[in-house]
Image (cartoon, rainbow, N blue to C red):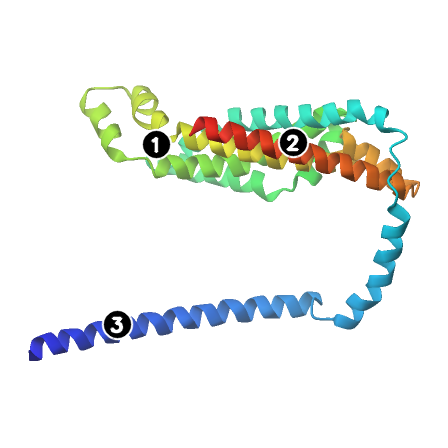
Amino acid sequence: MNTRSLDHNVIIDQQQRAWNSGALRLVTILLVIGLCIHYVGLFDGERLADGGPAILLLLSEMFPPDFQNARSWLKPLIDTLAMSVAGTALAVVLSIPLAFLAARNTTPHAVIYQVARATLNALRSIPEMILGIIFVAAVGFGALPGVLALGLHSVGMIGKFFAEAIEHADEAPIEAARAAGATPIQVLLHGVVPQVLPQMADISIYRWEYNFRASTVMGMVGAGGIGFELMGSLRIMQYQEVSAILLVILLMVTLVDTLSSTLRKRFK
């Protein structure tokens, strides 16, 4: 009885320490969040209240939406859709080899692992808007710089998620392939790829959703698409046309999200 009582007290003490440690972490996180919110002025009610009338005035100038030039937006919409598909495809093609090099269980060497991870981090850290400006300066205006910017930036995210999926692959099929005398390439093709392929497809579709929304912004830096039309309307302060373009973009985003949900269900 004494031993059991002692063990019970030890368990309670451990649970109490774990709870205290978790509570301390939560308080620390909430404190950091609160300080950041205060630092950026989100608690400045007077300033937010002063901005209210300006927002209401802008909204009043945006209605009713003006769809008079809607026909001229069809090609930019197609450009935006094509940009998102091509950029995502480019990113997936580049991400697959990088992901295998950046996964601990498939990389051929620790140095290669570090280089691959650093490459993914570097690509992920540069915003697509900055890449868009660079590629517009390099190859000119149009959809091509948008595709290159979206593709390279997406490699950083897609490659990271691919690598994590590979690292979480079950070791049993991999060991079985090695025991059967398979070459390293065969081990990857038969032991790893079948396990991670559904996750890779899911990640790629999610990224396509993001890239479609991002491609509308790429037009603002000269990369073509509907974003270029939106920026043109903003510059001449045609706010009714701006609201119409935003509604069209909202409709397209909804359609893309619906299509991607259907595709994800088919891959499961």
Sequence-wise, the earlier of marks 1 and 2 is: 1
Residue 137 placement (x, y as % from top left): 77, 31
Q: Nearer the viewer, mark 3 or mark 1?
A: 3
Residue at numbered disc 2: 255
Amino acid type at circle 1 is Thr
Do tag 2 and tag 3 residues touch (Cβ < 8 Å)? no
Mark drawn on residue 106: 1
Residue at the outermost front position: 64
When asked about the image quadrant of residue 51, the answer is bottom right
Q: Report the residue at 37% width, 71% height from top.
A: 21
Does any portion of residue 203 appear in the rendered image?
A: yes
Do tag 1 and tag 2 residues touch (Cβ < 8 Å)? no
Residue 91 placement (x, y as % from top left): 56, 28
Mark drawn on residue 14: 3
| Above or below: residue 30 compared with residue 197 | below
Question: SS for tag 1?
Answer: loop
Residue at mark 2 to residue at mark 3: CA–CA distance? 52 Å
Amino acid type at circle 2 is Leu
Residue at mark 1 to residue at mark 2: CA–CA distance? 38 Å
Sequence-wise, the earlier of marks 3 and 1 is: 3
Q: Is residue 80 left or right of residue 116?
A: right
When asked about the image quadrant of residue 124, the answer is top right
Instruction: Judge the density around disc 3: few (<14), some (14-19), many (≥20) Cα neighbours within 10 Å.
Output: few
Does any portion of residue 133 appear in the rendered image?
A: no
